Image: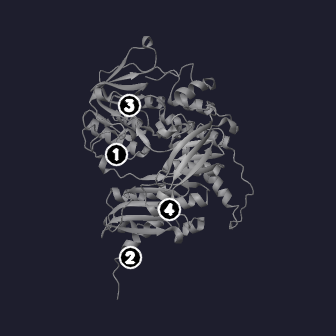
Amino acid sequence: FIPKMSSSSWTENDANRALTELEISPLDKYNVELLNEVHHKEYNNPKVTVEEYDLVVIGAGAGGLVSSRQAARRGAKSAMISEKLAGGDCLNVGCVPSKSLLKCARQIRDIRKTQSSDNDTGITVKEVEVDFSQIMKRMRKLRAKIAPVDGHVRGTDIGVDVFQGRGKFVDQNTIEVVSGKKEEEEEPILLKFKKAVIATGGRPSTPDVLKGVPYVTNEQLFNLQTLPPRMVVYGAGVIALEMAQAFAAFGSKVTILARSTLLSNGDVEAREMIKSILEEEDGIAFLEHVEVTEVTTLREGLATQIEGDVESLPLVKLTVKSGKGEDSTTTELECECLLVATGRLPNVQNLNLEKANIQYDEKKGILINDVAQSTSNPNVYAVGDCVANVPRLTHMSGEMAKVVVQNALFEDTWKVSSLVVPACMYTEPEYATVGKVKFTSPEEEEVDVYTTTLEHNDRAILDGDTNQGMVKIYCAKGTDTIVGCTIVAPRAGEMINEVSLAMKYGIGLGQVGRNIHCYPTTGEAIMMCGLQFINARWKRLD
């Protein structure tokens, strides 16, 4: 079955429908290309020609795409149900568009460094002209270029029956596809399955105080066409800090509201390093231990911004209490863009999970055992952001999908707990972690800490990054068994993979230190942590 591209495929005339149904705007040529790959305007679902699928997947993000496609490649009768945009958050409103913006922000920051009084590179750029509209257009262009990999046609070519609609459980081994067409136009689509995978992802969690206020989350941010003069970011995690730095580089005055502190689950030293850079180099203001007590709409703004017209943006006033105890203060802030990044919730609603006897927690997600199997229905598995107590990362979703295919179809017992999962925030410098990185105190929790700053790293010196980084590796006390790592450095996301590999396969820090690294590289900082372990145990000719 090949999905038919209808003569009424998306065009730029469908702007209102794209905005109201899919929150995609503007509907220019690039967003038309995107939608014609990941959510066809008129889609003819395939006829169900099998009595029972080996695997049926609800969801078309990273977890759904990997599980359905790998199953098909390995000979299974596989089906995937895509409700909104195939590619999920990552392609459409997450990893892909955000990294496009960060690339532009990084170039702007590099140019501005040539204007500083201590610039000795011999290169001077007198002015930086930022065309925000072009930055966003470039993002849409690149997103559309990547989209076919996640699109319906690609899945069908691999051998997956791709359905467009909402998947709902009918009973413990049947899922209905609700396509949204009128009942008289289509018979109910019922998919019987031997095994099923729930890969419905997550959505932003927003505080009640913002009800009725014009704010954006990551789901609307990338629709902007006009640069907001002032941005308030409510939240201080990865999404918040990445976009705060990007928009500060573009020219917005940015204030971050942290309910506790930024990166509250991370290493304290790394956290303070990142905060200092964002304040001093990017001019971002921080308010910590914040409670937003009141939010007022001063101007509604337009659903679709007019390019370059600030008056088309909303205007919001926030009353904020920050600080602790007697030191607390009250501040009023106005902004044209209120970005809310205060956490995520799992998409477990409206799936009829009860009919399939699938246990879940509305705030945490679907409850699974260590082989990614529902704790209450052994024929159903779950992956990614809709699952309780797993890291909410694209690469985690993809890796869990591989675990599920192996376990569900081939009766294996690959364990979720065996996965070593790195994470990276793509600010400048980047911030990457793996394993356990937050300790009450190293002494109490019986770990040894090995730290190398970039102050004496030759590559960092040559690149001018000497004040911007460190590698900190934590080992079980008295051993070289690595239990965690924090890196703050340019290309930290590339560097962390060496530590992840060592942890996965039981390679000790001493062995990492004996591994030859290219010179000069920032990655030598990892080797230097290993050499600290080795040098402390050298034999000496005394």
Residue position marked by numbered label 3 in the rendering:
349
Q: How far apart are marks 4 and 2 (CA)?
A: 29 Å
Q: Distance between the residues labelled 3 and 1?
A: 18 Å
Give the residue type that dot 4 points to. Answer: Glu
Local secondary structure at mark 3: loop
Q: Distance between the residues labelled 2 and 1?
A: 39 Å
Q: Which residue is drawn at 46% across and 23% down?
A: 2
Local secondary structure at mark 2: helix
Residue position marked by numbered label 2 in the rendering:
535
Is the C-beta separation of discs 3 and 1 under 8 Å?
Answer: no
How packed is label 2: few (under 14 Cα within 10 Å), some, or many (20 or more)?
Answer: few
Local secondary structure at mark 1: loop
Q: Earlier along the polypeptide chain: callout 2 or callout 1?
A: 1
Give the residue type that dot 2 points to. Answer: Asn
Split into 4 quadrants, where in the image is the C terminus?
bottom left
Split into 4 quadrants, where in the image is the N terminus?
top left
Q: In this view, does 180 lie to the left or right of 193?
A: right
Q: Earlier along the polypeptide chain: callout 4 or callout 2?
A: 4
Q: Nearer the viewer, mark 4 or mark 2?
A: 4
Residue position marked by numbered label 1 in the rendering:
389
Q: Which of marks 1 and 4 is in front?
A: 4
Q: Where is residue 58 in the image (x, y as percent from the top left)?
A: 38, 31
